[in-house]
Image (cartoon, helix red, strand yellow):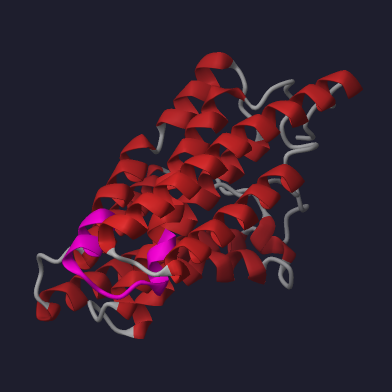
Amino acid sequence: MMPKSVAPDEAVALRASALRHVAVALVATAVGAVALAAALALDGGYMAASLLIATLGAIAVLRHLPGRHPHARLGPANAVTLARAVPVVLVAGLVVAPDSTAAAAFAVFAGALAAILDGLDGRLARRHGVESAFGARFDMEVDALLVIALAVLAWRWDRAGAWVLLSGLMRYAFVAAGAFAPWLRRPLPPRWRRQAVCVVQIVVLLLVVAPLLPAHASAPLAFAGVLVLAASFAVDIAWLARRARAPLEVELPRC
């Protein structure tokens, strides 16, 4: 289904609304990065990494918004997703920070907060009638950033081997493969399994990153999470392969 078009004045209003929300999110990220760096005695590398990730994310939001969000304002649902993105970016910035109990505790707290708020944006979008392809993709990308950030932390902080990076890379590999195999871009039917696996993956990585489990326990737990995620992707790929000969409908894939 093609998104309905918006009038020129509505497009201008949407861009202005997006700029305001993104600016607030960038300021919140900058303040959070400075405060966290001071609290954990992190060097300038952490602040630089956090602000770089936030800036790239802001550019992506503004670039992909036109034509994918047929409403005159960003809306409460996307505002919640932006709010979720702030702690996720602060966690992602820790990939350049050394391992410490305080850093791990913050990563778990911020990651859990972002995960708890997940789903609220979707409910708000449906309640206010402002669902969009942009909102669905935005929510998906925030979750993907959280997963890859936690996976990198688990690897860098010696909680698991480099193979744990598969937790975050599988989704990007699946999307990239769609450029060479168009049948992988077909829309997938909604399945509770995907949402459940996403939640399980985040919870597993939070437990692995948390300074609570010994290495001999965290690595097997992370490996089990990778296997569950791989199995979920395998089920979806098999479903798409069976329908590869049907007429192609190019739509945003569901996560």
Q: What is the quadrant of the N terminus in the image? A: top right
Prevailing secondary structure class for the magenta stretch in the rendered image: helix
Residue 198 percent coordinates (x, y): 37, 53
Q: Which residue sits at x=60%, y=23%?
A: 75
Q: Which of 164/186 is in front?
A: 164
Inspect this view and state whether residue 63 appears.
Answer: yes
Q: Which residue sits at x=69%, y=26%?
A: 17
Q: In which quarter of the view is residue 203 placed?
A: bottom left
Q: Which of 96/72 is in front?
A: 96
Residue 77 percent coordinates (x, y): 53, 27
Q: Which residue sits at x=73%, y=64%?
A: 182
Q: In which quarter of the view is residue 227 placed?
A: bottom left
Q: Which residue sits at x=48%, y=41%?
A: 28
Residue 231 percent coordinates (x, y): 38, 66
218 to the left or right of 107 = left
- Based on the picture, tell me whether residue 101 belongs to the magenta stretch: yes
Residue farthest toward the right in the current orientation of the protein: 8
Residue 92 percent coordinates (x, y): 43, 61
Using the image, determine if residue 114 lies above or below residue 48. Answer: above
Q: Which of 199/244 is in front?
A: 199
- Based on the picture, tell me whether residue 16 belongs to the magenta stretch: no
Using the image, determine if residue 193 lies above or below residue 240. Answer: above
The boundaries of the magenta stretch are 92-107
8 to the left or right of 178 = right
Using the image, determine if residue 24 lies above or below residue 169. Answer: above
Inspect this view and state whether residue 255 appears.
Answer: no
3 to the left or right of 137 = right
